[in-house]
Image: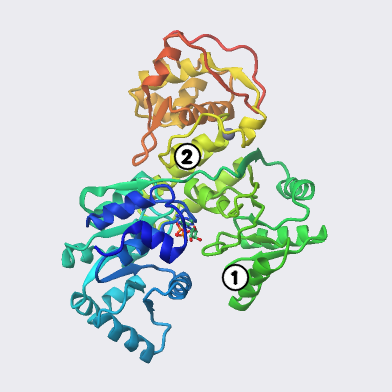
Amino acid sequence: MSLKPLDALTNTFGYPAFRGQQDKVIDHVLAKRDALVLMPTGGGKSLCYQIPALCMDGVAVVISPLIALMQNQVEALQQLGIAAAALNSSHPREDQDTVKTALLKGELKLLYIAPERLFAVGFINLLAKCNVSLFAIDEAHCVSQWGHDFRPEYLKLSILAEKFGNVPRLALTATADTPTEKDIIERLGLQYGKIFRAGFDRPNICYRLTSKSGGTAQLQSFIDSEHSENAGIVYCMSRKKVEQVATKIAQSGRIALPYHAGLSADIRKETQSRFLKEDAVIIVATIAFGMGIDKPDVRFVAHLDLPKNMESYYQETGRAGRDGLPADAWLAYGLQDVAKLKALMQNPDKSQQQQNLDHRKLDSLLQFCESALCRRHLLLKYFGEDAPSSCGNCDNCLTPPSQFDATEAAQMAFSCIYRTGEMFGAGHVTDILLGSETDKIAKFGHDTLKTYGLGKAWSRADWQSIFRQLLALGMLNIDMEGYGGLSLHESCRPILKGEKPLQLKKLTIPKKGKARTAKS
Ligand code: ADP
Ligand code: ZN
């Protein structure tokens, strides 16, 4: 190996040091091993393959679904004097031929392609004639049907393992949960499945969640009082709502532009460029907005409707404060959102298993909303990172919510789950606690349990909140791939045995009198 990674970093890219896990990933690739790299957007994934590309003989092939980003990267690399090129269908034929010739002559260090290119007639054979140093598969979550952005052509990338078994493959993504990670490793046939994960924390973002009551007015007052001169993004679920909210904010004298897939390409382009170039523009958008937008000084991202899951929340809020200066992630959620999202998830085009998973993922997000714990801690935990239990820069850390003694309620819930064999969902367990007369209760004889009707001091909504909080605390597990059955986690034992009290976030609905003590 002629060039050392650190020399490439300093001499070619002009950076003094590696960030986070970059050097570990690079060493791993140079040792010709496969890996999955999980880093947030802006975390520095590109160097993880660009540097090995420079240090190894031959050409690194980068597979990316985003043609616009591909073009930017290639231009940036060329400006640094690196022999990089892209092959995509938007280029004229002659240009494509020039690139192919350079490729065959071994003149390129990096070649960027869209996944479908790999399956164009003769392309695999062309690559087989070149000395390929590594494959980098960007946006690797697209290979997984669990991901939010499944692309069927990514499935065919398994061909790389078959045809180029000795060439290391590096899969990279900013968003993956455990099922998606497993999927990426399996479908791409990554040997040994080494995962590098780092840097999901965005310490300058202050996370704030509030329950919704007249959402637009709440948003307006948040913007007026804290971001009267700042650029920001407001996410809404529907196009209609985007238009309404944009109009409303514009009436307050701000520049607020709607953005959704129903607007013409010209208008969307114009909106994007105004957002990037002018100061203090507010974009009100559906999730159609954001991919590939790199504006460093977005001071707030607001959600007026719930995102689909934790991944989306993280990705969307992550567009705030890229410059490292303080920024807000603000969200207002209501139970109607949940109903709407659940209805949307009932999509006949999706398999039952996928629908179940979508529901479970939404539940994780609800637990996050519901929790009295540090938002950052929970968010990072979801992505598999350890974080201190308190960050000092989220609503729950800054103004801890009031709590109540939930020891009895938790004991009832645990006991009821245990007595019914740890296989029923929160709805059925709640029915038992409330003493409801349902067919399911009759069928299983659950009306004979000691906990039957024991929880009447709380309402159904209270119980929902209690279950979500117990889940958020990790005292209960939920069967993510099945039907949402609840089971007990070891950590519930001291509470069940009465050795430890439990505080939960105060319920929004007033309690009716005192609860009885659970005996079973
Ligand atoms: P990602 O692909 O993970 O979204 P990028 O690879 O585009 O992130 O990197 C984000 C930014 O961070 C880029 O401007 C890049 O040049 C910069 N960067 C990455 N690694 C380093 C480093 N070790 N030192 C300084 N800047 C870095
Ligand atoms: Zn916190």
On the image, the x and y values in percent for residue 237 come to 59, 55
Query: Marks 2 and 1: CB-CB under 8 Å?
Result: no
Q: CA distance from mark 2 to mark 1?
A: 34 Å
Viewer-closest of 82 and 217: 82
Pick whichever, 26 or 209, lies toward us. 26
Q: Is residue 339 left or right of residue 281?
A: left
Please name whichever residue, 415 or 279, is drawn nearer the observer in this view of the structure. 279
The vertical placement of 282 against 58, above or below, is: above
Q: Amino acid at mark 1?
A: Gly
Give the crowd class for mark 2: few <14, some 14-19, many >=20 residues within 10 Å: some
Position of residue 240 measured from the top left corner of the image (x, y, whole percent): 66, 62
Which numbered marker is on residue 262? 1
Amino acid bearing label 2: Leu
**Is residue 138 among the parts visible in the rendering?**
no
**Residue positioned 30% across, 63% down in the render:** 3
Work out which quarter of the rendered image holds the N terminus and state it. bottom left
Per the image, label 1 sits on a secondary structure element best described as loop
Farthest residue in the bottom direction? 94
Report the front residue among 480 and 515.
480
Which residue is labeled 2 in the image?
Answer: 380
Q: Residue at x 62, y 36 (%)?
A: 393
Q: Is residue 160 left or right of residue 314?
A: left
Q: Quadrant of residue 118?
A: bottom left
